[in-house]
Amino acid sequence: METPYFVIDQNKLADNLQELQEALAATFAKSIIGYSFKTNSVPWILDFMKCAGCYAEVVSDDEYQLAQKCGYAPDKIIYNGPAKSEATFADALAQGAIINLETHRELRWLEKYAMTGTKVGLRIQIDVETFCPGETAMGELGGRFGFQLAELPEILQQLQRLGVKLAGLHVHTSSRTRSLKVYQVLARESVAIIQQYQLNLDYLDIGGGFFGGDRAIPSFFDYMTVIRQQLQQLVNFTDLTLIVEPGASLIATPVSYVTSVIDVKRTPRQIYVTTDGTRLHLDHLFVKTSYQYQIRGQSAEDVVPQQIIAGFTCIENDHLFILKNAPLLKENQQIIYEKVGSYTMCFNPLFIKYFPAVYVKNDEGMKLVRRRWTVEDYVRGAK
Ligand SMILES: Cc1ncc(COP(=O)(O)O)c(C=O)c1O
């Protein structure tokens, strides 16, 4: 098989999803899993999630259309984020998708498109940083998503005037720690808002951002227990649906990236091992600090103190990792990066070479689910 390529381990993916489903079934009477498309939207994965009963969590007009193209029923789409188009917003409203409002223009669109029986959700910003200092993605700068609590009375009045029901709150907050405390705070503050404004909601959407896979700690059950402990204070707790939007916690651990050594060079200062992979395929923002990897194939060469494992691109610092005190690698040896399924294969620039192939490994063997992109794919639409 020609490297580089990604491999999705279907059994591991199924195990991760089952663990989440069991955790939800043990803690909530009603729940929905909305798979976060942005985390990895390879169509095979979207189909797998759909067949397993997940909803689609989408954050742009393109992702909304992708969900439809992949056969998600309109009422099994959760439409979030600021990148909705007016046309897809109107379509989602008419077709009964779960829409969480994020921007002021959506409030204006509602004036045009609301009908009797229209329901919407609202993304509200909860200031998690105050309660969990240093844990949120943006720290002191604060997040930029969701309406401010101070805007809620006016929005509630508008919805009432239009005869639109506020069906849910959406409170996803990206954190660096993925800690239980973050979810405890999100649930606790949601309860306070619901009680203060006497909201009669169908759902609370707590978002994604969990750890998961490979017996992660906290476990899905730990997260759901913490959330439940807060939400059960609500009078309509048993009627409330908990929506979760997992991405990384389901898809990170089942995916590997297989590369081969194409050259070994001794320079006056270093030994560089060039591979046919690239950091751009795993970490195009160049922020990751380490990878879990395996080296396949024996090298009979002497042990050397340090080898820099690099990618094929012309970016000088396309370095993946430094291999210390190991036999000198040789051409065609494989380096396999593990647990690389989130924000990788659908978060690549089309730089120098196009998207690598994706395979699924299951009990029947290996199946190609995305062929390597060629120049034909690249120029399509450009003529
Ligand atoms: C609104 C929303 N939902 C879900 C997710 C998925 O998060 P993760 O892939 O960390 O589970 C994100 C990621 O940023 C998000 O912004």
Image (cartoon, helix red, strand yellow):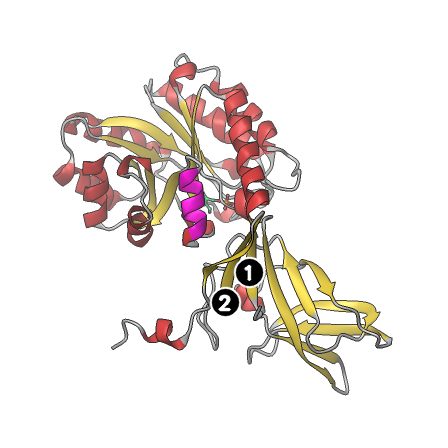
- State which region is magenta: 44-51
Q: Residue 19, how many percent across, how many down?
A: 57, 33
The answer, for residue 119, to whether it is visible in the render is yes
Q: Which quadrant would residue 280 be assigned to in this image?
A: bottom right
User: Which badge, 1 or 2, is on the more N-terminal residue?
Assistant: 1
| Residue nearest the viewer, comparing 233 with 87 | 87
Amino acid type, residue under disc 2 in the picture:
Pro
Residue visible at 55% across and 64% down? 5
Amino acid beneath label 1: Phe
Q: Using a 10 Å C-alpha cutoff, classify the residue at mark 2 as few (fewer than 14 neighbours), some (14 to 19) or many (20 or more).
A: many
Residue at left offset 58%, top offset 36%: 132
Up the image or down, 288 lies above or below 182; here it is below
Residue 33: x %, y % from top left: 44, 34
User: Which x, y percent locates residue 85?
Assistant: 24, 51
Total marks placed:
2
Disc on res. 302: none
Q: Magenta segment: does it hold 83?
A: no
Asked whether, in this view, residue 232 is left or right of residue 12, the answer is: left
Picture quarter with the N terminus = bottom right
Local secondary structure at mark 2: loop
Within 10 angstroms of label 1, few (less than 14), some, or many (20 or more) residues? many
Which residue is depicted at the point 42% across and 74% down?
Answer: 374
Q: Name the residue under label 2.
A: 356
Q: Is residue 367 left or right of residue 149?
A: right
| Mark 1 and mark 2 residues within 8 Å of each other at the beta carbon | yes
Q: Residue 116, relative to residue 54: is it above or below?
A: above
Kindly identify which residue carries mark 1.
6
Gap in Å between the C-alphas at discs 1 and 2?
7 Å
Q: Is the magenta stretch mostly helix, strand or loop?
A: helix
Task: Indicate left or right for 16 with 326 as reference.
Answer: left
